[in-house]
Amino acid sequence: MSVRDQIGADLKEAMKARDQVRLDTLRSALSGFTYRKVEAGHELTDDEALEVIRKQVKQRSDSIAEFEKAGRAELVAKETREREILQAYLPAQKSPDEIRAVVKEIIASLPEGGRNQGGVMKVAMPQLRAVADGNLVRQIVTEELGT
């Protein structure tokens, strides 16, 4: 079952359960799929659909950070719940230790001149994009390079 089909089925369940937050979140995801489909001009692949969900998870994370700064606990709770709902559709994320191991391998494989943050990130992100948060990867790369 594709990601889109799974979300559609879960949307029906949310309607039956009258779970408004889940319903709104899943509708938002389906809307994101529609916008992306129009942009792309073709039906979305599962990878493209997952990219839409990753983008929405990142938006929720950014909103949570801003709401925490503003002291809006009720909005932090709502955004956190929405983020958790969306994350259930993403593949399992690598742990920081697993990411660190991949980053160390990449650093060791690069020539001396390419061992800077940009060079390492350029190699690391294609490998880790689907299974790790970019900000966490950047943080680990910075720590490993000692910059």
Image (cartoon, helix red, strand yellow):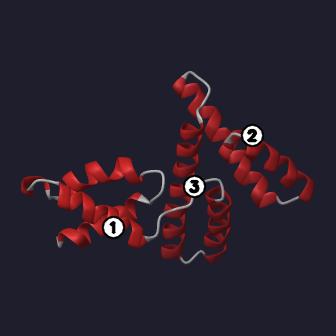
Q: Which mark is residue 91?
A: 3
The quarter of the rendered structure image containing the N terminus is: top right
Which x, y percent locates residue 72? 59, 74
Which x, y percent locates residue 46? 60, 38
Q: Nearer the viewer, residue 102 or 7?
A: 102
The reply to whether callout 3 and callout 2 are in contact (CB within 8 Å) is no
- 129 left or right of 86 in image: left
Q: Nearer the viewer, residue 110 or 84?
A: 110
Q: Is label 2 in a helix, a strand or a loop?
A: helix
Residue sitting at the far left: 113
Q: Is label 1 in a helix, a strand or a loop?
A: helix
Query: Residue at point 41% right, 71% down?
Result: 96
Q: Nearer the viewer, residue 76 or 121?
A: 121
Sequence-earlier tag: 3 or 2 = 2
Q: CA distance from mark 3 to mark 2?
A: 16 Å
Q: Nearer the viewer, residue 70 or 92?
A: 92
Query: Residue at point 38% right, 62% down?
Result: 135
Amino acid at the residue labelled 1: Ala
Q: CA distance from mark 1 to mark 2?
A: 35 Å
Q: Which mark is residue 101?
A: 1
Which x, y percent locates residue 82? 66, 61
- 35 left or right of 133 in image: right
Q: Which mark is residue 5?
A: 2
Query: Residue at point 61% right, 59% down?
Result: 87
Amino acid at the residue labelled 3: Pro
Q: Is label 3 in a helix, a strand or a loop?
A: loop
Mark 1 against mark 3, which lies toward the viewer?
1
Sequence-earlier tag: 1 or 2 = 2
Amino acid at the residue labelled 2: Asp
